[in-house]
Image (cartoon, rainbow, N blue to C red):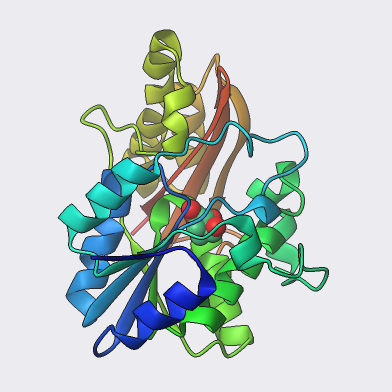
Amino acid sequence: MRVAHSRAELAETIARLPGALALAPTMGALHDGHLALIAAARRSADSVLVTVFVNPLQFGPTEDLAAYPRSLDADLAACARAGADAVWAPAVADVYPDGEPTVRVDPGPLGSELEGSSRPGHFSGALTVVARLCNLIRPALAVFGEKDYQQLVLIRRMAADLELGVAVAGVPTVREPDGLALSSRNVYLSADDRVRARSLARALRAGRAAAPGGAAAVLAAAAAELAGLDVDYLELRDPELGPPPRRGPARLLVAARVGRARLIDNTEVTLAP
Ligand code: PAF
């Protein structure tokens, strides 16, 4: 597995990767959810490049940029085990050699809903770095976790709206045995928080089970499991994150603060047959 840091090393690395290239962008602190991204990329392309970059643009001034877990040596070992062909682990100055870009991707109205309502600027920062990575690396395919469902929807939309020339694939969320979605931010949970954090996945399961009863039943069943948690939102939307349909496929999304961590999760539900 080749490891690149500078832009020159990246260019040299890409030149040596054969066939169709899949990109798995990550912020490091890799867990099994990321390894599932790499495995999905592996299945769909000839070569797989993973980026490990904590993108300052997508963190708000009071968010956890400085504290965000960083573990490059372990990440490189995990990428090699998962079958990645190459990793680009740049410094901030390699990605933004001219300083932070003043021209950024506008995520449109969905960018200020759900996650965007408590994280202003987050999606603009995330989309901007994904666009930049795609332009630098020119992959045929880029893979993203369904755990960050709103990000996935927005990246798909950006790829279409800006004709980025990259196919975007979503990869199902990987969970702990008790249902907690894997997240690099789970390291912020104390033992007590970890127990309370189960409620998110429980709420999604309860919502899914109530789906034959329609939207109101889904929201009521899910909310009952979240009692006592500091819930940021619990919403039912259509799969593109527009208003919920009366029946058929929909997405149930939740965000809550548990101790120091802000956790998000989501699931597909099928409303009333
Ligand atoms: O989902 C993430 O880890 C990040 O938002 C991404 C897509 C790597 C962009 O920094």
Q: Which image quadrant is residue 92 in?
A: bottom right
Write down the quadrant of residue 46 in the picture.
Answer: bottom left
Relative image position of residue 144 (x, y in whole percent) = 41, 63
Query: Considering only vertical position in the picture, is 257 above or below 181?
Result: above
| Percent coordinates x, y for residue 223 in the rendering | 51, 28
Is any part of residue 25 visible from this angle? yes
Left or right for 45, reference 127: left
Q: Residue at x 30, y 41 (%)?
A: 74
Regarding residue 173, the answer to whether it shows in the image is: no
Would residue 264 appear left or right of 37 to someone viewing this image? right
Residue depicted at x 42% and y 48%: 28
Report the residue at 16% width, 53% height from top: 81
Q: Toward the viewer: 215 or 101?
A: 101
Judging depth in this view, the residue of 104 and 212 nearest the camera is 104
What residue do we see at 77% from left, 49% from top? 120
Location of the C terminus by quadrant is: bottom left
